[in-house]
Every structure is written in structure tokens, then in C-alpha cells.
Amino acid sequence: MEISERILLSAEELFFRYGVKSVTMDEIARELGISKKTIYQHFPDKDELVFQVVEKRMVKNRTDMVCSVGAGKNTVERVVLMNEVMRQMLSVVNPGILFEIKKYYPRAWQVFQKHMQEHVLIDTVADLRQGIADGLFRSEINVDVMARLRLKEIEFGFDNQWFPPNEYSLAQVQYEFMDHFLRGILTDEGLSVYLKHYPA
Amino acid sequence: MEISERILLSAEELFFRYGVKSVTMDEIARELGISKKTIYQHFPDKDELVFQVVEKRMVKNRTDMVCSVGAGKNTVERVVLMNEVMRQMLSVVNPGILFEIKKYYPRAWQVFQKHMQEHVLIDTVADLRQGIADGLFRSEINVDVMARLRLKEIEFGFDNQWFPPNEYSLAQVQYEFMDHFLRGILTDEGLSVYLKHYPA
């Protein structure tokens, strides 16, 4: 593996575990057993490093989603599977990470926002349309409004001003949002498919 | 009516119609047929004026809600009535207003946020608990998480980056959010009460 690749992976791992702000270039260098100078040869500053970590992660997320989610037999199953992927990721992630990026790393935040507004929004709209076509989601819903709401919910779950990590579990909050979102759009048929996955 | 009172009312009316940023102190003075100097005798700058307009409005909103909503026979009816009050207000409001305040008038934004996090959050949690007690909302919902979600939805509806006013109607978006939110938490009994108010 190339050294720049190794730096990105190591940085991501440390960011996920400890958050972005508190991890220094020194610590990343130490983790990899290389000098800080070597890092700076590939990434002029931490800003650029954070930017590239987020960019890489967004590409990977999309591939992961497409793969794991393709396995679902119908839209409800796919959404549930998609949420499982997210939940597994969230259970290991430092809950403050997204809001640190928003606050301190505007370029990286832009990449995240762009990814959400382009790929994730388009995928979500497509999922909602498919669910309606399959009779699982109510045909009266406004797919554009609902898709935007769903995206905002995911972002909101990371907001640790509203959900302090010592009081709320990130994975649990995201689960409650997903569960509520689905129940709000399911038809009777959709609900019975859903309940097979999450027996009360 | 005192002159400071009249200035506040007139400013609010102009802000609601045209947004906050584009209305000048000159225009407020002209609307009232007074000199700009008179305004500055009561409000040292536009920041302070915006701050007091928002503060006054928050107090009024709460009174309006308590009055109109008290008429509801049950929680579902109350939520629907509450939404009607909001809808009427929104239909006359400049859709960009909330995000202008967020961006340009941080003190006024703080008042709004404080109002939401204190009064509106507490009221919403109480409504959700009451609805559960009445058998209208599912008892499995996490009231703290759902109340926060509901508040965020209202704020999100005003976000004109996600909902450009030339493509989306603010009142319609808020209606879709409320409808979806309720359906996501209603029991079967709650749903039939709700559908009596909004026949499909």
C-alpha cells in the first residue's frame, strides 16, 4: 500500500475513535511509525488531510451501501439493511465527529454535504419511488420533501448539542429516526413486511 | 400605544413580508411616518430591534398556541390545531426569514433557539406523553428523541437551501412534515382519530 494511502487509513481510524480535533499530526505519525515530516510531504496541513479522509470515506460508503443493500428483496428490506450498515459503523464512531467537521473543517464539510445532496438524496428519492411502485410506501407522500427530511434526520442524530453523548446513544437515536421515518410512510402491506424484520 | 411598541409591530410586519435583511431602518421610519432618529432613540441599532422583535414574537406565539390549542378535545386534535395556527402564520411569512436571522442576527437567533429548546421542547414532550396516556401515540416511542426531531423538522422546513421558495411552499413542506411525524407515532386508534380531521 502506498504511504499516502496508509496515512489516510490510519488518520481515519484515529478520527473515528477519538474525534477529529483532538488527534494531532504527531499522533498519526507515531501510530504509523513514520516522521511527521513524511506526512507533511503528502498532506500540506491537517485541513487537507481531513478533507481527503472525508472524501475517501464518502466514496467507500456509497460502494458499501450499493453492495450490502443490493441483497434486499424489496425496498423495506433494503432500507432496514442500509440502516444495519449505518448502525454498525455508528457503533464504533466518535459521536461528535460530524459536528466537529462542520465547525472546524469547512472544506471537508462541503464534501460531506455535496455527497449527501447529490448521491444520497438521489438514491433516497429513487428508493422512495420504488417503494411506492411496490405498494410498500404510501403513494401520497411527497418524495422530494421526504427524502430531504430523511437526510436531515441522519445529520441531526449527530448533533451533540441536542443529543449529548453521555445521555443518548448515537446508534439508538439513528435507529429511532429510521423506525419513525418508515412507519410514517409505510402502507399497511409495507408495515407488515417491516414488522417481519423487527418483531415487537 | 407607546412609540417603541409601534416600532416593534411595524418592523415585525415588514420583516415578515420582505425578510429581515432587506428592510432598512429608513423604511421602518417611513412606514410609521416618524424620523429615523426617533427609532434610534428607542433601539440603538438594527441588531437590537431584530432581537426585540423576535423576543416579543416568541412570547406571543406561546400565548397563541396555549389559547387556540386548549380547544382540542384530545392530543391529536390539539396537534392538528397547533399546526393550523402555524400554517396560517407561515402563509404570510417571508420563507427566508428564519435563516436570515440565523446567519445575520446571532443574538435574535439565540432567543429563538432558547425558546424552542425550553418552552417548545417541554410542551412537545408533554404532548407526546399525554398522547401515549390517551392511547393515541405508540407507547414504544422515545418521547425525548421524538420531541427533538419534531422541533428540528420545523426549523428545517425554513431552510431555503434545501427548500428553495420558488420550488417549495413553506406551508406545504411544514404540513408534510407534521403529517408524516404524526403517522409515524400514531396507534391504530390515533390514526382513525387523525383521519377524521384529514379525510384522504
Image: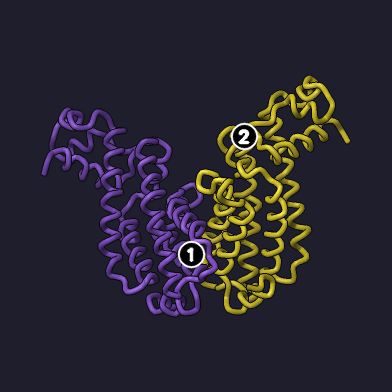
Chain colours: A purple, B yellow
From the viewer's perspective, is B139 left or right of A83? right
Identity of the residue drawn at 68% across and 37% down: B18
Q: Which of B23 and A159 is in front in this view?
A: B23
What's the mark number on residue B107? 2
- Secondary structure, mark 1, is helix
Among the 4 quarters of the image, the one containing residue B122 = bottom right
Q: To which quarter of the image does residue A113 belong?
A: top left
Q: Where is residue B138 in the image (x, y as percent from the top left)?
A: 55, 73
> For mark 1, what is the residue?
A181
Amino acid at circle 2 = Arg
Question: What type is the residue that disc 1 sits on?
Answer: Phe
Give me the residue at 36% from left, 36% from top: A107
Residue under mark 1: which chain is it in?
A
Q: Residue B64 location, x and y as percent? A: 76, 53
Secondary-structure class at tag 2: helix
| Foreground residue among A27 and B162 | B162
Determine the chain carrying the residue at label 2: B
Outermost residue toward the right in this view: B1
Compared to B105, does A57 lie above or below? below
Q: Nearer the viewer, mark 2 or mark 1?
A: 1
- Residue positioned 60% across, 44% down in the render: B113
Horizontal and vertical percent position of residue B102: 57, 38
Label 1 crowd bin: few (<14), some (14–19), many (20+), radius 10 Å: many
Q: Which residue is drawn at 64% across and 36% down?
A: B108
Q: Which mark is residue B159?
A: none
Give the image quarter of residue B31: top right
